[in-house]
Image: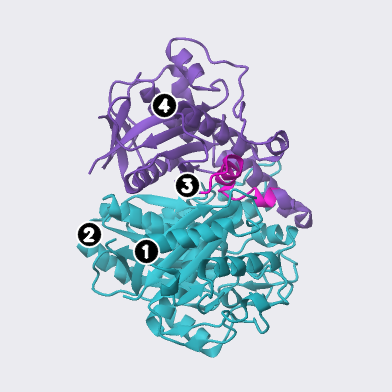
Chain colours: A cyan, B purple
C-alpha cells in the first residue's frame, strides 16, 4: 500500500485546545475533567467540557450552522494553524479535489433539545429554532466543508463512538479510488442532555472521575471534542502515516459489546492485515477504554487474544472524558503525538489494574520512542474501528 | 473520473410501494397499493425484536432484505452502507421531549436506539453480518454521499456492497425542518462491473442546481419531491430498465453525480 500521511492535525478537548496545550496537560498529568456544570443537568458526575465554546459566534454565511457542535468545530479550526494548512492544501489542489469527511454522534442535538424546551403554544418550533442546517446528523461535515471552502465529496460518518476513526478509512478510500486528491477528516461531538441522561439511564455514568482499566472503575464520564486532520500523499511535513484500518460489526447487541470481543478482535486483525504487520510490530495501543466495568474487561481480553503479550497500552479518556463521535479523532491525535514525541501517556486514574492487564496497562506516563501505534474505537450498534499509524 | 458499478439486486419499502413488483405495476400504469405499509415482510428479526426495534429499522431492513434476495446473496455477506438524512426523527422527538419534561425518565432502550447507526446495527444483528456495516448522512443529499461511499468500497474491495437509503417523515415539531410526509427506503446491491445485466457509470459533475432525469409517473414524482430518500427511485426505475436516459443527482455541497448506463 502506498501509505497516506497525516500532514496536519489539531484537537480541542477538555485537556486542552491545540497541540501545545495538550502536550502541556500530558506532561503535567493534568486531567481536563471537572465536576458536572453543564446547564440543565443535575447529574452527579464529572464531564470533559471545553472552555469558551459558548462564546463562539458563527457569522455571515456560516450563521445558519450556529449550534454547540459547530461552535466547538470553529474553535478547533482556529488552533495549530490548521486553517493555514488547509489554505496551503488549496494552493496545491482544486477545492473539488479535497474531500471532507467528519464523524459525529451528537451533531446539533443540543439545539434540537433547546427547540423542544421552547415550543410555541401549538407545540411547534419557534421561528428562531427552525434551522435546517443544524437539526440534522450531517450538520458538522456540512459546516466544516463550508467553513474551509472544500468542494470535494462531503460526508458525515455517524456510527456512534467509532465515527471519527472511520473517517480515516473513508478519506483513504476516496483518495485511492480517485474521487479526491486529499481529505480533511475529523470528528466533532459536544455535550448535550441526550448523552448525559442517556448514558445515565443505562447506568454507565460514573459519579467520580473515570478510571479506565482500574479495578475500582465505576463507569464513564462524558466529554466533548473537535479534531481535524489532513490526509494526503507525499506532503512536505507529516505527523505520521496511516498504515491500516479495520472496520467490523459485532452482530450482537445495540448497547453491549460482544462478550468475547469478537468484533474488536476482528477489527484489530483486519487493521494488522491491511498494514501488512504482525502483532509484535505494534509499540503502543491507545485503547477505547471507556472505564465501564464490562467494556474494559472485554477489550483487555481482546488485546490478550490478538497480541498474547500486548505492548504498553492505555486509555486517554480520563484526560478528556468519552467524546463519543469525536473519540476516534481525539485518540488518533493522541496516538500521533505518541509517535512524534516518544511519550506514552498514562491511563490516568488507573492505580490498580486488574491482574489480567496489569503488565501492559500504563499506570504512569513513559518516555519511549515508538514507530507503530494502534488506536481502538468501539461503538453502539456493535460498530468497531481500529487504526494503525506509523512514524512519518 | 468514472466508476462502473453493476446492479445485482434492488429493494423498496414505502407506503403503497412494498416491493419492486409493486413499483413495476405502477410503471405499467397501475395504481399504488394503498393498503401496503412500509417496513412489512421482514424475516430477519424475531417477532419480539420486530416489535421493539425502531421504525427506521423496519423501514430500511425491508428494502435491504429484498435487495439481497433479488441478488441471491446471503444478507450477512456484503459490507453495507446505510445512509439517511435525519436518522430516526421519531426517536429524536421522543428524546428531546422527554429531556425537556422529565429527563430522569428517559428510556435506556430508546436512548441506545437513538444512534444514527441503529438501522445498521440491527441489520448486523439480524443478518449476523460481521463485516463493516456503516452509517452515513448527507442531509438531503444522503443518496449522493451513500452512492460515492458504496462505489469506493466496491472499487477497493472488488466485492458487492449493499447500499440502503432511508428516511422517515417527521410527525411533530420536526416537520419544520424535515417536511417529508411519507417514509421511504430503497436498497441497491452493487458490485464490480460484470458482463450482462445492468452496469452503470458514476461520475462527478459540477454546477447542477436540481436533479435531471427522465420523467417518472406522477405518483412516483410526488414521492421524490416529498422525501429526499425517494430520489433513489430514479435508480430503482433504471434497474427495471425503464429509464432510458442519464440521471443527474444534484448535491448542495460537493460534487453532483452523473449516472449513465454503461
- In the rendered image, residue B206, in percent from the top left (x then y), is placed at 26, 42
Relative horizontal placement of residue A388, taking residue A124 as reference (left or right): left
In what quadrant of the picture does the C terminus of chain B appear? top left
Chain label for disc 1: A
Are the two marked residues, 2 and 1, in contact with CB atoms closer than 8 angstroms? no
Q: Residue at x 45, y 85 (%)?
A: A343
Circle number at residue B137: 3
Above-or-below relation of A148 to B116: below
Chain label for disc 4: B
Circle number at residue A275: 1
Which residue is under mark 2?
A: A93
Which residue is under mark 4?
A: B236
User: How far is disc 2 from disc 4 in space, using C-alphas?
Assistant: 35 Å
In what quadrant of the picture does the N terminus of chain B appear? top left
B65 in magenta: no
- In the rendered image, residue A301, in percent from the top left (x then y), is placed at 61, 67
Above-or-below relation of B67 to B118: above
Please determine if labels 1 and 4 lie on a single subunit.
Answer: no
Identify the element where label 2 is drawn.
loop
Per the rendered image, the range of residues in magenta is B110-130
User: How far is disc 2 from disc 1 in space, using C-alphas?
Assistant: 27 Å
Q: Give the residue at the far front of this rendering.
A: A308
Identify the element where label 3 is drawn.
strand
User: How far is disc 4 from disc 3 in space, using C-alphas?
Assistant: 20 Å
Chain label for disc 3: B
Query: Which mark is nearer the camera, 1 or 4?
Result: 1
Quarter residue B221 falls in: top left
Q: Residue at x 49, y 10 (%)?
A: B30
Identify the element where label 1 is drawn.
helix
- Asked if one can make out residue B249 in the rendered structure from this viewpoint, the answer is yes
Amino acid at each position: 500500500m502506498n501509505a497516506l500521511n497525516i500532514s496536519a492535525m489539531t484537537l480541542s478537548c477538555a485537556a486542552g485546545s491545540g497541540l501545545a496545550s495538550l502536550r502541556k496537560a500530558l506532561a503535567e498529568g493534568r486531567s481536563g475533567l471537572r465536576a458536572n456544570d453543564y446547564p440543565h443537568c443535575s447529574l452527579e458526575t464529572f464531564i470533559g467540557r471545553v472552555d469558551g465554546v459558548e462564546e463562539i459566534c458563527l457569522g455571515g454565511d456560516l450563521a445558519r450552522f450556529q449550534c454547540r457542535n459547530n461552535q466547538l468545530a470553529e474553535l478547533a479550526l482556529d488552533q495549530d494553524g490548521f486553517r493555514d494548512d488547509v489554505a496551503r492544501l488549496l494552493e496545491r489542489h482544486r477545492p473539488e479535489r479535497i474531500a471532507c469527511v467528519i464523524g459525529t454522534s451528537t451533531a446539533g442535538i443540543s439545539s434540537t433539545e433547546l427547540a423542544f424546551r421552547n415550543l410555541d403554544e401549538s407545540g411547534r418550533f419557534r421561528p428562531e429554532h427552525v434551522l435546517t442546517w443544524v437539526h440534522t446528523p450531517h450538520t458538522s461535515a456540512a459546516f466544516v466543508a463550508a467553513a474551509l471552502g472544500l468542494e470535494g465529496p462531503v460526508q458525515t460518518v455517524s456510527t456512534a463512538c467509532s465515527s471519527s476513526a472511520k473517517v480515516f478509512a473513508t478519506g483513504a478510500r476516496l483518495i485511492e479510488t480517485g474521487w479526491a486528491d486529499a481529505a480533511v477528516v475529523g470528528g466533532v461531538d459536544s455535550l448535550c442532555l441526550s448523552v448525559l441522561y442517556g448514558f445515565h439511564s443505562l447506568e454507565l455514568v460514573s459519579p467520580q472521575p473515570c478510571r479506565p482499566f482500574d479495578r475500582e472503575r465505576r463507569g464513564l464520564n462524558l466529554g466533548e471534542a473537535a479534531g481535524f486532520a489532513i490526509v494526503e500523499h507525499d506532503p512536505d511535513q507529516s505527523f505520521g502515516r496511516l498504515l491500516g484500518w479495520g472496520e467490523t460489526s459485532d452482530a450482537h447487541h445495540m448497547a453491549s459489546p460482544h462478550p468475547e470481543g469478537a468484533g474488536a478482535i476482528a477489527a484489530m486483525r483486519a487493521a494488522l492485515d491491511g498494514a501488512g504487520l504482525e502483532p509484535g510490530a505494534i509499540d503502543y495501543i491507545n485503547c477505547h477504554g471507556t472505564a465501564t466495568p464490562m467494556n474494559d474487561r472485554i477489550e483487555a481480553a481482546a488485546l490478550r487474544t490478538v497480541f498474547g503479550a500486548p505492548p504498553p497500552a492505555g486509555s486517554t479518556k480520563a484526560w478528556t472524558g468519552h467524546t463519543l463521535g469525536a473519540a476516534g479523532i481525539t485518540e488518533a491525535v493522541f496516538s500521533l503525538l505518541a509517535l512524534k514525541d516518544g511519550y506514552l501517556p498514562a491511563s490516568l486514574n488507573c492505580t490498580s489494574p486488574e491482574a489480567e492487564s496489569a503488565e501492559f496497562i500504563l499506570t504512569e506516563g513513559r518516555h519511549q520512542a515508538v514507530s507503530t501505534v494502534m488506536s481502538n474505537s468501539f461503538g453502539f450498534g456493535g460498530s468497531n474501528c481500529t487504526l494503525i499509524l506509523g512514524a512519518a | 473520473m468514472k466508476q462502473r458499478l453493476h446492479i445485482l439486486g434492488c429493494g423498496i419499502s414505502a407506503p403503497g410501494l412494498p416491493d419492486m413488483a409493486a413499483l413495476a405495476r405502477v410503471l405499467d400504469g397501475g395504481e399504488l397499493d394503498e393498503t401496503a405499509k412500509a417496513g412489512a415482510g421482514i424475516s430477519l428479526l424475531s417477532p419480539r425484536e420486530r416489535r421493539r426495534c425502531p421504525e427506521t429499522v423496519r423501514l430500511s431492513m425491508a428494502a435491504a432484505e429484498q435487495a439481497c434476495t433479488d441478488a441471491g446473496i446471503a444478507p450477512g455477506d456484503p459490507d453495507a452502507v446505510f445512509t439517511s438524512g435525519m436518522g430516526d426523527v421519531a426517536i429524536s422527538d421522543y428524546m428531546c421531549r422527554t429531556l425537556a419534561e422529565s429527563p430522569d425518565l428517559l428510556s435506556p432502550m430508546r436512548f441506545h436506539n437513538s444512534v444514527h447507526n441503529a438501522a445498521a446495527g440491527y441489520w448486523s444483528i439480524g443478518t449476523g453480518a460481521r463485516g463493516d456495516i456503516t452509517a452515513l448522512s448527507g442531509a438531503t443529499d444522503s443518496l449522493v454521499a451513500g452512492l460515492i461511499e458504496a462505489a469506493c468500497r466496491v472499487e477497493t474491495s472488488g466485492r458487492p456492497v449493499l447500499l440502503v437509503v432511508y428516511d422517515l417523515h417527521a410527525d411533530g415539531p420536526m416537520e419544520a425542518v424535515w417536511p417529508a410526509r411519507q417514509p421511504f427506503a430503497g436498497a441497491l446491491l452493487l458490485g464490480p462491473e460484470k458482463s450482462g445485466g445492468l452496469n452503470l457509470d458514476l461520475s462527478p459533475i459540477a454546477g447542477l442546481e436540481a436533479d435531471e432525469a427522465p420523467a417518472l409517473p406522477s405518483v412516483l414524482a410526488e414521492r421524490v419531491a416529498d422525501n429526499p430518500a425517494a430520489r433513489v427511485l430514479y435508480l430503482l426505475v433504471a434497474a427495471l430498465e425503464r429509464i432510458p436516459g442519464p440521471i443527474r443527482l444534484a448535491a448542495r455541497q460537493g460534487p453532483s453525480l452523473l449516472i449513465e448506463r454503461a
